[in-house]
Amino acid sequence: MMRKAVSPIVATVLLIIIAVAAGVLIWVWLHGFAEKNPTAQPTLQEE
């Protein structure tokens, strides 16, 4: 039984979707990491 191969257009669309999803996941992870570890020095508040 012969199987049809995935068309190049479908393969390209899937690769683009995977790349965008990976980019979004990395951005969300880095954004959350930056919020938890601010680079600015904390300031002392006078009471």
Image (tube, rainbow, N blue to C red):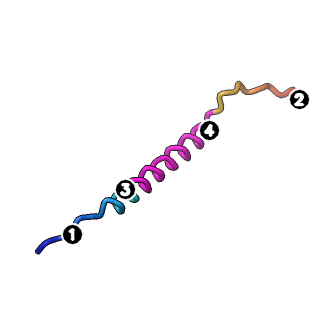
How crowded pointer 2 is (Cα within 10 Å; few <14, some 14-19, many 20+) is rated as few
Marking on residue 12 = 3
Rendered position, 22 above or below 13 = above
Q: Amino acid at mark 1?
A: Lys
Magenta segment boundaries in residue numbering: 15-37
Residue lying at the far left in this picture: please name it: 1
Specify the amino acid type for callout 4: Lys
Q: Which mark is residue 14?
A: none
- Which mark is first along the chain, 1 or 2? 1
Q: Which residue is mark 4?
A: 36
CB atoms of marks 1 and 4 within 8 Å: no
| Residue 31, horizontal then vertical, whole percent | 59, 42
Q: Secondary structure at mark 1?
A: loop
Distance of label 4 from label 2 (alpha carbons): 25 Å
Tell me: residue 15, above or below residue 2: above
Nearer the N terminus, badge 3 or badge 2? Answer: 3
Identify the residue under disc 1: 4
Dot 1, crowdedness within 10 Å: few (<14), some or many (≥20)? Answer: few
| Nearer mark to the viewer, of 1 and 4 | 1
Q: Contact (CB < 8 A) between labels 3 and 2?
A: no
Give the quarter of the image for residue 46.
top right
Is 32 magenta? The answer is yes
Q: Looking at the image, tell me whether mark 4 or mark 3 is earlier in sequence order.
A: 3
Between 29 and 37, the one nearer to me in the picture:
29
Query: Which quadrant of the figure contains the N terminus?
Result: bottom left
Q: CA distance from mark 1 to mark 4?
A: 49 Å
Q: Disc 2 marks which residue?
A: 47
Rounded to the nearest angstrom, the CA distance separating label 1 from label 3 is 16 Å
Q: Position of residue 43 (x, y in %)?
A: 77, 26
